[in-house]
Amino acid sequence: MVSRSRWGRKAVFGVAAVAILALSFSATAAFAGAVTFKDAQFSGYSSGTVAHADLLQMGDSRLVNADEAFTGASVNTAGLPAITNELERVVSPANADKKSYGRGAGIDVGINQSPSLDGKILLAGKSESAAPPTTNLDTKDLLSGNIPANPLLYASLLRGQSRAQWDPDVCPTGDISFGRGSAADVQLLSTTGSNVGDTGLLDKPLVATDSSIEDQGRTVASSYSHEFLGPQTNSSGAKIGAPGAFGLTSEVRMTIAPVTLLKGTPNEFTIEFLGEWVLSAVAGGIPGSAYIHYGPGAVNPQTPVLSLIRNGVVSRIITLQQILGNEGIDIPIPNVADIRVGEDPRALGNSDPNSTPQVAGDGTSASAALDVVKVTLLETGSTHAADIRIGHMEVKAQVPVNGIDCGIPVTKSANPPGVEVSQSFIVSIKIDNPFGCDLTAVRATDDITTRGDARFEVTGTSPTADTVPAGSNRASGMIIWNNIGSIPKGTSKTITTTIKAEGGGGEIDDVANVSAVLGGCEGQGEGNQMVGKSIKLRVPVVLKLKLPPTGVGTSTATFLVALTLISLAGVTIRQMRRTA
């Protein structure tokens, strides 16, 4: 809040006049207690793996550890800590000088090493980005002819992408950080240890996303992890917070190609998936604004979203309602595998499928993890031949109480700095757009109020306003511009009001409010609404005195004027101290 002084009004020896104290403010008003972005402490991470497979885990080491379409993204205003996911893969390395980080890899394969280390075979170049400063999109591609990993894997195309943005003074309106990993026609871990001739294809791969089923049409698997700021909403998507107050979302979005296990063997089976699978952790900072969302896009509950196919025949169809209405479905294949499908989101770091995600009642944090499908092959005691996860996702978000203030910067100034009654002054309202989106459908209002005997008349606006308070000697009124057009990212726009000072001594207050819809975003944020509010431009009253017409000499009059001004100044200072 901004303290304000209340200047008293006195009629002394003649007609009072009004003057303008031209104050220009660059700060924006806080929204419902939200913490200004540059002061807010928040953090989050997301990690996704379309297909994970590890062989012969013994203690802290695995003979082979492979992740297809592996992604990670994180943000932390206190500096990046080291983050490792449940599969003991590095999501984000420690870096105290950076605030956001993204990474993506088509394939990450480690051989006979601790899973917490980056794979010794890093394919698609492991694209990674960290900010500040904000980075450009980084893309690493690798074609099949350049993949030196036979007989561990085959792929026709691998891609890793990443980007990170951070400016300590500007709310990010797109993705704060993201990583994307894509892989086409992937085969992992030949069960015979050999290739098919000189084709590069694996002989009887343990995991393959190049299904032999006819008319499959989908052989590209991709994972996309990102963090972004968005309006405070409840789990139904309804906005419940104040405009301009934002929360943090950590999200994984995943397209899963049909996955065939034990391909080319008598035990071959395929799991087919529908649509894009999404896991989100949302924290808005107010009660009801923290929640976990999970599901394969927006589909009807009765829609088949997952099928199990053996010997070319669909042996099991699972609907969205079955997945979201149960805590997982077990499908055993005797002497081959145990398949667990459709578990609910669970507590992050807790492998118990009956655990529940952590969601704070005050809306400040949420976290969860899940595997769309978990397959265990030939498990024996504490050692297993293979642990396979399909659609592994982890998300976590934390924000301060009341969320984050992401207001549009709005500043005001008056020119000239002082006027007398019957003179005019111009109020300039400057709207800045430092964001990664255009501000579209920009609406602005100028709310004018008075105190004491001060009055006003609006004599002009530029551009022409849609609503202007008519008449002179007004005590209050609002000017409205319904749409002043768009403000492209990185630019600003100024609108003006011409006001004629009327009436007597008092105070004129002037506050501008701006709202806009985000468009042309560099990442997430399209269609979100932002608002901005200027701190009050105050118009205090000072008194100008006319000399008495008769009865007082010049020197006496001068003395009385000086004495009166000194007296008024003393009163004003005392009042300002009381109200500061």
Image (cartoon, rainbow, N blue to C red):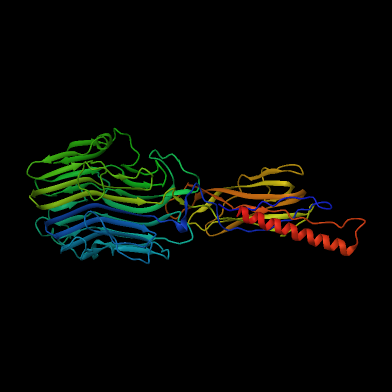
Of the pair 176 and 12, the residue shown nearer to us = 12
Q: Percent from the top left, x then y, of residue 87?
A: 21, 55
- Specify whether residue 214 is in view: no
Q: Horizontal placement of 449 versus 230: left or right?
A: right
Query: Horizontal placement of 275 versus 475: left or right?
Result: left
> Could you say which is closer to the camera, residue 166 or residue 563?
563
Q: Is residue 220 left or right of residue 432?
A: left
Image quadrant occupied by the C terminus:
bottom right
- Is residue 544 in view from this perspective? yes
Residue at image point 20% right, 53% down: 52
Tally of marks: 0
Residue ranking furthest to the top: 302
Residue 358 at x, y percent in the picture = 30, 45
Q: Position of residue 330 (x, y in %)?
A: 16, 39
Q: Position of residue 496 (x, y in %)?
A: 67, 53
